[in-house]
Amino acid sequence: MNRSALSNRSRLDRAGIALSGLCAIHCLASIVVVSALGLGGQWLLAPEIHRWGLALACVIAGVAIGWGALRHRRRTPFVVAMTGLTFMGGALAAPHGIEEAVLTIIGVALVSLGHILNLRHSH
């Protein structure tokens, strides 16, 4: 694989890690702000944010980790990330609150770990 393609995949993996972190912060901040202050529920808890976030995570993980799996022929990053995306999808079916946040945080942690493993295997 040429340097340019490896660099692009690395950027996608790093974007996936950043997106996972932002998602976790969003979940925790939403619970704290809405519960403690009663503010922002209509924006912070909007289902569209979660649907778009999951769609973006699926695209980034699918491209970066799928590309990496084809390159380094290791299934672990792919399996870990897809398990995380499954948790994130399950969170969409949960009612807003602690259950949804726990499922989402587990999911984004696994997706992030998949991206980290993918980066490690690419070197």
Image (cartoon, rainbow, N blue to C red):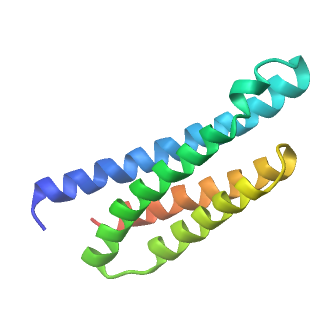
Rendered location of residue 25, percent (x, y): 65, 35
Q: Is residue 37 left or right of residue 72?
A: right
Rendered location of residue 22, percent (x, y): 57, 37
Figure disc tally: 0
Q: Is residue 19 left or right of residue 1?
A: right
Q: Is residue 89 left or right of residue 14?
A: right
> Residue at horizontal 35%, vertical 70%?
66
Q: Is residue 43 left or right of residue 35?
A: left
Nearest the eye: 31 or 89: 89
Rendered location of residue 15, percent (x, y): 40, 45
Q: Residue furthest left?
A: 2
Rendered location of residue 92, percent (x, y): 71, 54
Above or below, 95 against 1 in this view is above
Above or below, 84 against 97 in this view is below
Q: Quadrant of the C terminus?
A: bottom left
Residue 111 image-quadrant placement? bottom right
> Residue at horizontal 29%, vertical 66%?
122
Q: Quadrant of the N terminus?
A: bottom left
Residue 34 image-quadrant placement? top right
Nearest the eye: 33 or 92: 92
> Residue at horizontal 47%, vertical 58%?
58
